[in-house]
Amino acid sequence: MQRTNRRRFLAGIATTGTVLAAGCSSSGSAGDGGDDSNGTSGGSGGGNGSGGNATSESGGSTSGDATAGGNGTGGASGNSSAGGETTTVASGPDGRLVFEPEAVEVSVGDTVSWEFESAGHNVGAVPKDSEEVSLPDGAEPFASYDGDPYAVVEEGQTYEHTFETAGEYTYVCIPHVSSGMVGTVTVSE
């Protein structure tokens, strides 16, 4: 029987750790939600039908909870409709538990991009996840997470959603809704 020396043992542990870290940092699945209601073409994979993307600021791929289950990876403008405007909302600026601005107004076909300026936040407009959430009739729920409403987006990343139904949307940060981290998007025709 061959004896394992300390150096060989430590090299094996380091290799195993590197492989595990690489596997844990992969983005899972790719896709933009796959429902095509957001005016984009293509996209692969399932997702939650939210029509949203979670991306890094550089427009590259994401890692971690933001893509758990396929809310997608893609370019920073991968969800914008032709001719639509993009409005930016800061999530957790300066570590505060707020969306800034708290209320935005956009037109049908416009995109809202949430920039996560501090860790521990998400965006959720899924009525079953919080009683604070409200959507106009006929609007599809959207969220920066898929499945686990406490999954958060990493600091420095963005989440985008293109609005196709007019009305008022109330969305929340699920981990901080009890602290008042609630925002609204009013969509006009």
Image: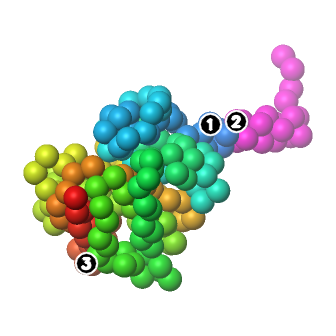
Residue 26 in percent (x, y) is at 60, 39
Residue 169 in percent (x, y) is at 21, 62
Q: Secondary structure at mark 2?
A: helix
Q: Magenta segment, which residues? A: 1-19
Q: Residue at x 45, y 73 (%)?
A: 90
Q: Amino acid at mark 3?
A: Gly
Give the labeled residue for mark 2. 19
Q: Amino acid at mark 1?
A: Gly
Tell me the distance, in whole angstroms, between the alpha carbons under discs 3 and 2. 40 Å
Give the labeled residue for mark 1. 23
Q: Residue at x 77, y 42 (%)?
A: 14
Residue 176 in percent (x, y) is at 31, 71
- The mark lying in front, picked from 3 and 2, is 3
Query: Pointer 2 and pointer 1: residues touching (CB < 8 Å)?
Result: yes
The label shown at residue 141 is: none
Q: Is residue 161 visible?
A: yes
76 in the magenta segment: no
12 in the magenta segment: yes
Q: Residue at x 47, y 79 (%)?
A: 93
Viewer-closest of 174 and 52: 52
Viewer-closest of 152 and 51: 51
Give the labeled residue for mark 3. 180
